[in-house]
Amino acid sequence: MKITQTRENDSLTIAVAGEIEAVNADELEQSVLGSLDGVNSLTLDLKDLEYIASAGLRVILQAKKAMGKDKSFKIINVQDDVMEIFEMVGFLDIINFG
């Protein structure tokens, strides 16, 4: 898994490439949750994400919760295989996909 962060003012985009599995989900969690100070808009760019396990789904839910209702959180550029996983677990109802 490769994580790249791009910050502009109070907007943070985190691009994730490869696979998010139980063995590396903690790295993603630390990267996301540790970078939210002063962030009002968080975007996860999953263009190069090939697979996400339940541990990765948990990290996404934590990020959404950390952003709260008054801040922006969205996921963009999701590959079809990963989108199928999001659909199966009901993420389409609770997360903004832009």
Image: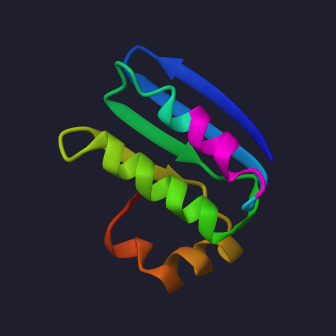
Q: Which is nearer the eye, 48 or 20?
A: 20
- Magenta region, residue range: 23-31
Is residue 98 visible in the rendered image? The answer is: no
Q: Relative to 36, say whether 76 is above or below.
A: below
Residue drawn at 52 percent across, 20 percent down? 7
Residue pushed farthest bottom?
Answer: 88
Residue drawn at 60 percent across, 80 percent down? 84
Give percent across and percent down for residue 60: 49, 55
Q: Does the magenta run of residues contain 28?
A: yes
Q: Relative to 31, say whether 18 is above or below.
A: below
Q: Is the magenta stretch mostly helix, strand or loop?
A: helix
Q: Does the magenta run of residues contain 58?
A: no
Q: Which is nearer the eye, 55 or 4?
A: 55
Give percent across and percent down for residue 86: 53, 74
Is residue 49 visible in the rendered image? The answer is: yes
Give percent across and percent down for residue 73: 37, 46
Residue drawn at 37 percent across, 62 percent down? 95
Q: In which quarter of the image is residue 39?
A: top left
> Does residue 93 appear left or right of residue 74 in this picture?
left
